[in-house]
């Protein structure tokens, strides 16, 4: 199996597990209807774990453009493979979403709520505030990349590493996922959102493209931030590019804080 096919397969499996658990929890007349956030977060974490078991020894199981970009930015991954990885990840996520749609076909017509249908495919913020949603995705993805890098410097019993990464995903979901649904992965959101747009889902509504840039660019900046923080703290690597990312992230955080403060005073 090629590294690019491995990324396709890994991301495909991730969406089968992740999209599948959301579908089961929100679509009507499913046996697992109303299973709740706990079930969803655990399934996403285990989905990452099994995707890593499936293809980790072939491609490294990035299964996430933010991971690929973060690793390339920190010089842990070659830039000439980045585009191929990202394309494979998006195609894998799209294909996984199509399979989830087919699997739950009888339930789409039973579900009237358009937001629930969209949530099976892509993230939907709890409170729509674009700058704060962006910050949520940025911080959560920064923790993801920072975590992946410091996990990598530890030695685990053979076969344990994917479980540790899955636990990291669950920790992020429980702690930081309540605001946006923790996309932390541009392919996980964009690929299935494309599937939602193209598939003939009865009564589906629009695909919310206005929100779509948030779970793409928030995780990308977060990945660069997490990678920069790791390099500066653990390896004392103080390259200008890392300082620049920290500066941009600080500007975003300050802007979000000021805007949030003004909003609260207005209310």
Image: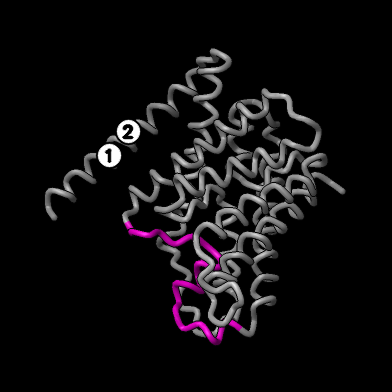
> Residues under labels 1 and 2: Cα distance?
6 Å
Residue for point 71% across, 36% down: 80
Q: Is residue 52 left or right of residue 29?
A: right
Q: Quadrant of residue 16?
A: bottom right
Does the magenta-highlighted stretch encompass residue 115? yes
Which segment did they paint magenta? Answer: 107-128
51 vs 132, nearest the viewer:
51
Depth check: give the residue in front, 146 or 187. 146
Q: Give the residue at x 53% y 43%.
A: 171
On residue 203, the disc is none
- Local secondary structure at mark 2: helix
Q: State whether residue 135 is above or below residue 79.
A: below
Reading the image, the residue beneath label 1 is 255
Q: Is residue 31 above or below residue 189?
A: below
Q: Residue furthest right?
A: 1
Q: Residues within 10 Å of mark 2 (few under 14, many from 20)?
A: few
Q: Position of residue 184 (x, y in %)?
A: 53, 47
Give the residue at mark 2: 251
**Residue displayed at 56% across by 47% down:** 170
Instruction: Name the residue located 55 percent from the left edge and 29 percent from the top edge.
Output: 227
Residue 109 on the magenta segment: yes
């Amino acid at each position: 199996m090629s590294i690019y096919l491995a990324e396709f397969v890994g991301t495909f499996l991730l969406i089968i597990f992740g999209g599948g658990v959301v579908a089961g929890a929100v679509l009507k007349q499913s046996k697992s209807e109303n299973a709740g956030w706990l079930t969803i977060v655990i399934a996403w974490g285990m989905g990452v774990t099994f995707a890593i078991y499936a293809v980790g020894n072939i491609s490294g199981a990035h299964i996430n453009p933010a991971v690929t970009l973060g690793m390339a930015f920190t010089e842990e991954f070659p830039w000439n493979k980045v585009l191929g990885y990202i394309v494979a990840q998006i195609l894998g996520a799209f294909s996984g979403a199509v399979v989830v749609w087919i699997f739950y076909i009888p339930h789409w017509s039973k579900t009237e709520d358009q937001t629930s249908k969209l949530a099976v495919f892509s993230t939907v913020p709890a409170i729509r505030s674009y700058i704060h949603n962006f910050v949520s995705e940025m911080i959560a993805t920064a923790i993801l990349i920072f975590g992946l890098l410091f996990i990598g410097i530890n030695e685990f019993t053979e076969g344990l590493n994917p479980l540790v990464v899955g636990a990291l995903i669950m920790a992020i979901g429980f702690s930081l996922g309540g605001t946006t649904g923790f996309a932390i992965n541009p392919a996980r959101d964009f690929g299935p959102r494309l599937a939602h747009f193209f598939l003939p889902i009865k009564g589906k509504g629009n695909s919310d493209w206005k929100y779509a840039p948030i779970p793409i660019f928030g995780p990308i900046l977060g990945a660069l931030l997490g990678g920069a923080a790791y390099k500066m703290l653990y390896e004392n690597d103080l390259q200008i590019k890392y300082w620049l990312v920290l500066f941009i992230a600080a500007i975003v955080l300050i802007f979000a804080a000021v805007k949030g403060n003004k909003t609260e005073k207005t209310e």
